[in-house]
Every structure is written in structure tokens, then in C-alpha cells.
Image (cartoon, rainbow, N blue to C red):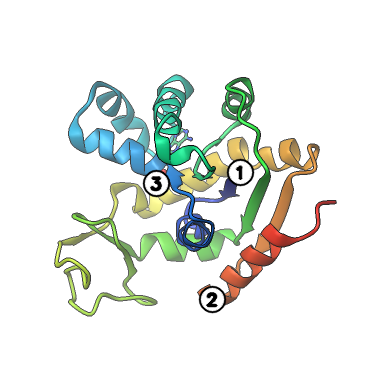
């Protein structure tokens, strides 16, 4: 099963992709995580990507597509995968097509912008293991440190309020048109985010199991 999770940054794609990954036993591939790791390792691609990420802009297609191609060639992708954060524009969707990747379903997770802004600006992530918290809705039991591994909790530079606004603008301008792209192919399935994470998870599974149009 090859799935794409579409939705604004902070809509909860990562959280729900994790639940689906576990159930279907396929990996989640997050281009955001791949790019952050490349920046941390100071690879050539990472150095080129850094300024774009910090400003909330899309990293140039050529760089991201190469990173994705390499990741998809790994053995654990043989039985399928979930793409979280890719494609982010029509050129990237077309690149997937020309790689011969046939996507089964695209799950569009719908969350309103004001909810996203509140979520992202209050998000804290663990520097060491990447676990995610929220200062109000999901604080760590260990205060400024990760409840799972004890690592330091930080605010991602691109979760700063003005960068979040830019990321949402980029999403609406460049990524949202992909809904039409996949709808035309009969592959788009929508789940509307709820207040409760468990309810959203239920809606995600419902959308993934729904009869095709
Ligand atoms: P994310 O963790 O998915 O919100 O991604 C964080 C940042 O990484 C984005 O704001 C972009 O700067 C960059 N990024 C992630 N995926 C892509 C992509 N498919 N194309 C271009 N830039 C990306």
C-alpha cells in the first residue's frame, strides 16, 4: 500500500501516519525529517536546504526529489510506505509519477488555519529523539526535558509565529492544488481533524477504508 498524507503543516500528518504505519507495517517517510537530519549532519544538500526551511519556504524540488528517490530505494519500502510532506507541489507529484510510483490513496487531513497556528507555535520537540509535545495540550512530565529520553525540548525555528504564517501561505498556494490533482484521479479521501486525537485517528482509518468513488 502506497499512501500520501496531505494537509497543512501541523495538521497532524505525522501523528496519524505513525498509527497507520504501525497497523499496516509500512514505514512513514517524512521529507521534513530527512531534510532536518541532512541539515544537522551538514551534508551538501542540508547546507543548501537550511535557509529555505528557516524561512518556511519549500526546499528546491531537485534537492528534495533526490533525497526521496534515495529513501524509496531502501529495502523497507518494498511493501509500500506513507509519504508525509511529499509531494508539496505539482512538480513533485509529477516527479513521483515519472518515477513509476503508483499511489493507492491520498489522505487529506483538514484542519483550520487558526488551530494550526496555535498548535505549531506551542509545539516543543525533543532535540534528541524528535518526540513532540505542546506547552498547553501535551506538556512533558519532565518540564523542559523529554519524558521519553530526557533530551532537551526546543522550539523548531520554523515554528516561530511569523514563519508559521509563511508556511501556511506556501501550503495554500503550492500544496493545496494537489487536492484537485489527486481528486481527478479518484484517489483523494478526506478526514476532518477533530479536537480529540483518537477521534481524528478513527476518521483517518475510516477514510482509508472507505469505498473508492
Ligand atoms: P515538515 O516537517 O514536513 O513541516 O517540513 C519542514 C520544512 O522542510 C518545510 O517547511 C520545507 O521547508 C521543507 N520540506 C519538507 N518537505 C518538503 C518538500 N516535499 N518539498 C520542499 N520542501 C520540503
Secondary structure at badge 1 equals: helix
Pointer 2 or 1: first along the chain? 1
Q: Which mark is residue 163?
A: 3
Q: Percent position (x, y) of residue 3? A: 60, 46
Pointer 2 or 3: first along the chain? 3
139 on left or right of 29: left
Image height check: is 213 above or below 175?
below
Tell me how far mark 2 sits from mark 1, CA to CA.
26 Å
Dot 3 surroundings within 10 Å: few (below 14), some, or many (20 or more)? Answer: some
74 on left or right of 113: left
Q: Quadrant of residue 142?
A: bottom left
Which residue is labeled 2 in the image? Answer: 198
Labelled pair 2, 1 in contact (Cβ < 8 Å): no
Q: Is mark 3 within 8 Å of ligand 1?
A: no
Labelled pair 2, 3 in contact (Cβ < 8 Å): no
Q: Residue at x 27, y 33 (%)?
A: 38
Dot 1 surroundings within 10 Å: few (below 14), some, or many (20 or more)? Answer: few
Which residue is labeled 1 in the image? Answer: 172
Amino acid at each position: 500500500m502506497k499512501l500520501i498524507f496531505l494537509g497543512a503543516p501541523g495538521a497532524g500528518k505525522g501523528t496519524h501516519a505513525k498509527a497507520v504505519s504501525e497497523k499496516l507495517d509500512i514505514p512513514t517517510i517524512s521529507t521534513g525529517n530527512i531534510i532536518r537530519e541532512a541539515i544537522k549532519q551538514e551534508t551538501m544538500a542540508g547546507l543548501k536546504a537550511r535557509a529555505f526551511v528557516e524561512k518556511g519556504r519549500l526546499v528546491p524540488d531537485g534537492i528534495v526529489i533526490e533525497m526521496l528517490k534515495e529513501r524509496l530505494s531502501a529495502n523497507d519500502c518494498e511493501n509500500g510506505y506513507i509519504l508525509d510532506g511529499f509531494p508539496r507541489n505539482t512538480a513533485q507529484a509529477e516527479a513521483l509519477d515519472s518515477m513509476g510510483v503508483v499511489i493507492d490513496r491520498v489522505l487529506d487531513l483538514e484542519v483550520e488555519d487558526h488551530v494550526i497556528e496555535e498548535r505549531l507555535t506551542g509545539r516543543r520537540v525533543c532535540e534528541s529523539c524528535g518526540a513532540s509535545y505542546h506547552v498547553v495540550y501535551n506538556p512533558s512530565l519532565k518540564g523542559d526535558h523529554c519524558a521519553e529520553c530526557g533530551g532537551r525540548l526546543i522550539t523548531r525555528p520554523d515554528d516561530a509565529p511569523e514563519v508559521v504564517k509563511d508556511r501556511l501561505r506556501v501550503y495554500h498556494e503550492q500544496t493545496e492544488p494537489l487536492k484537485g490533482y489527486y481528486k481527478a484521479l479518484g484517489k483523494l479521501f478526506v478526514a476532518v481533524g477533530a479536537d480529540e486525537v483518537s477521534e481524528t485517528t478513527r476518521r483517518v482509518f475510516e477514510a482509508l477504508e472507505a469505498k473508492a468513488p
